[in-house]
């Protein structure tokens, strides 16, 4: 049993790291570069630069094995889904507030005309045809009055400002997560290509 455990430990210690996979990947790319009629050294320099940048990134993130890479990708996928759901929720909330603010604007812009024409039969019909939005905005405002029966303009504007800030922060976070995922997916792709070429399976 001890010998079996020792063998398993030795196999674990000799499992290739991401650095090993990437080194082999870029060695193969350099071998391909050797077949170029022109630009061989430029291709090798590019490969070396990419290899160094990728290794530095992985070390900074403390990701050294394919298993850790998979865990990181899953972790960022989960974060991305959470941010996406929160962003969707906040955008819907902002839309509702903006509907109220637009209704208020439309209501006060058209109400003077309504008051002028409401007692004139022909004028009232013309108003209904040309300003149907007035009745829609009036209904929206009545449905959203505060406890005192007032239009909560200040509250709506504060909510809109707050939601806009939260949405901007969520979009920034979404962009950051996407950028990290692209880096990890690129490493994953390199490892998968190498494993496929060497017949290890993915």
Image (cartoon, rainbow, N blue to C red):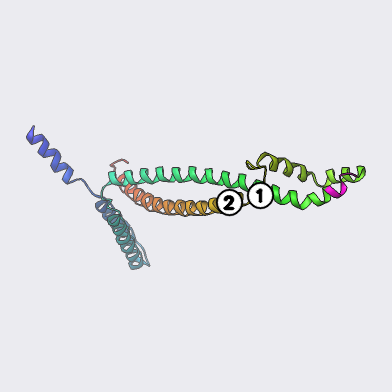
Dominant SS of magenta comes to helix
For the residues bearing labels 1 and 2, Cβ distance under 8 angstroms: yes
Name the outermost residue toward the top: 1
Number of numbered labels in the structure image: 2
Can you say whether 40 is above or below 7 in the image?
below
Q: What x and y, as percent, mark residue 161?
A: 56, 54
Name the outermost residue toward the left: 2
Can you say whether 177 is above or below 2 in the image?
below
Q: Is residue 57 left or right of residue 113?
A: left
Q: CA distance from mark 1 to mark 2?
A: 9 Å
Q: What x and y, as percent, mark residue 15?
A: 20, 45
Residue depicted at x 47% and y 55%? 172
Q: Secondary structure at mark 1?
A: helix
Residue 78 can be seen, yes or no: yes
The one of 152 and 31 positioned closer to us in this rendering: 152
Image mark for residue 160: 2
Question: Looking at the rendering, which quadrant does residue 146 occupy?
Answer: top right
Name the residue carrying label 1: 101
Query: Quarter of the image containing the C terminus?
Result: top left
Q: Secondary structure at mark 2?
A: helix
Q: Is residue 167 left or right of residue 51?
A: right
Residue 120 within the segment the image draws in magenta: no
Q: Is residue 180 left or right of residue 18?
A: right
The one of 161 and 43 positioned closer to us in this rendering: 161
Query: Quarter of the image containing the N terminus?
Result: top left
Residue depicted at x 40% and y 50%? 181
Pointer 2 local density, CA inside 10 Å: few below 14, some 14–19, many at least 20: some
Residue 196 can be seen, yes or no: no
Q: What x and y, as percent, mark residue 13?
A: 16, 46
The magenta segment is 115-119
Q: Earlier in the sequence, mark 1 or mark 2?
A: 1
Q: Is residue 130 left or right of residue 63?
A: right
């Amino acid at each position: 049993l001890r010998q079996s455990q020792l063998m398993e430990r030795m196999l674990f210690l000799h499992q290739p790291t991401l650095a090993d996979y990437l080194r082999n990947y870029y060695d193969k790319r350099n071998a391909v570069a050797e077949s170029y009629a022109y630009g061989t050294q430029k291709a090798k320099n590019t490969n070396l630069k990419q290899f160094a940048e990728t290794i530095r990134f992985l070390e900074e993130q403390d990701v050294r094995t394919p298993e850790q890479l998979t865990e990181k990708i899953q972790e960022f996928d989960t974060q991305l889904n959470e941010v996406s759901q929160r962003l969707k929720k906040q955008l819907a909330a902002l839309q509702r507030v903006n509907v109220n603010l637009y209704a208020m604007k439309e209501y006060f812009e058209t109400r003077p005309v309504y008051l002028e024409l409401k007692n004139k039969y022909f004028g009232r019909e013309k108003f209904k045809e040309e300003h149907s939005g007035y009745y829609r905005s009036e209904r929206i405002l009545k449905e959203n009055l505060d406890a005192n029966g007032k239009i909560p303009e200040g509250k709506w504007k504060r909510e809109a400002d707050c939601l806009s800030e939260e949405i901007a922060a969520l979009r920034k976070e979404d962009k950051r997560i996407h950028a990290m995922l692209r880096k990890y997916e690129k490493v994953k792709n390199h490892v998968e290509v190498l494993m496929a070429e060497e017949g290890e399976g993915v």
